[in-house]
Image: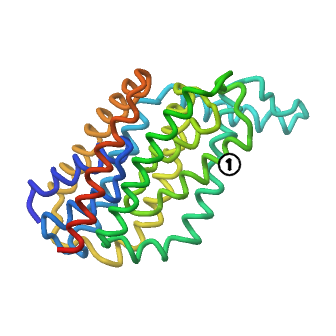
Amino acid sequence: MSLFEAIILGIVQGIAEFLPISSSGHLALTQFLLGTPEDQIFFLTVMLHIGTIFSVLVVYWTDLYNITLEFFKMCWDTLRGKGLGLDNLYRKLGLLIIVGSIPTALMGILLRDIFSEVYTSQRVIGIALLMTGTLLWASERTQKFKENKKSLKEMSWLNAIVIGVFQGLAITPGMSRSGSTISGALFQGINKETATRYSFLLSFPVIVGASLLEARDALTYGTGDVTLPMLLVGIFTSFVAGVFAIRTLIRMISKGKLYYFSYYTWALGTGAIILSFL
């Protein structure tokens, strides 16, 4: 593996992790196009998540700080018999993230081995990309007809569970995590700002948890021929690309252009399926 390949993989990871186009699908296709063996690339792809973790930290630092602070305050108030105090939106947001993470974690643990077997299947990735595009197109079209769009204050625990299930579906290579969660929120009548904010905040514990689980497998595979400069450059590249992707998606959703990504994922999915037959 070369330094150039590490940069390419970092860019792909950072952009595809947050834009609704599937990071797992893009990394698998990129690996195929670069012709890099999985045992040489797996360690680096796991470590690239460190960069995307910091991307969320930078963009949503205020939210994450206040959520953490209010969580500990809530625990203290509960011990003193003062209740949860869910009129505080940061406390509610923190609990919504916990609730939404539960179905995702269960699906990830129970279905991980099944979907890991199809990670390198271009046909499966292609079909999943087509599904991602359909979700994006349908959710934005559906939301236009929803009335009384829910804000964070109006979100329910059931809303969080459903979004968590949508996020769990993204374990399928080719299914976008951000695309699935944002679509799951829009289908339930949650407004775009809240859907986007909740999606990215919900990604934080998932990316951290998935990275810890995959780190064990990465150590089993070994580092391959990845050097320290390659690792650092890849992580930094994924961080910068991640920040760019988050801010870009926020702007596009606010302008009602989420469905633009449908055309891209449909085209890429179709290409992957055709390629699988060649």
User: Which quarter of the figure is the C terminus placed in?
Assistant: bottom left
Q: Quadrant of residue 276?
A: bottom left
Towards the viewer: 49 or 202? 202
x and y percentages locating residue 41 in the rendered image: 23, 67
Describe the element under mark 1 as helix, strand or loop.
Answer: helix
Up/down of 222 relative to 33, above or below: below
The answer to whether residue 56 is left or right of residue 157 is left
User: Which quarter of the figure is the N terminus placed in?
Assistant: bottom left
x and y percentages locating residue 217 in the rendered image: 39, 74
Q: At 50% across and 33% down in the image, what residue appears?
A: 141
Q: Quadrant of residue 53?
A: top left
Towards the viewer: 265 or 216? 265
Q: Quadrant of residue 255?
A: top left
x and y percentages locating residue 152 in the rendered image: 65, 27
The answer to whether residue 247 is left or right of residue 146 is left
Towards the viewer: 254 or 10? 254
Q: At 54% across and 26% down in the image, what residue appears?
A: 144
Q: How many marks?
A: 1
Coloring basis for residues: rainbow
Up/down of 111 relative to 155, above or below: below
Mark 1 residue type: Ile
The crowding category of the residue bearing disc 1, from other C-alpha atoms within 10 Å (few below 14, some 14 to 19, many at least 20), is: many
Towards the viewer: 124 or 162? 124
**Which residue position holds label 1?**
161
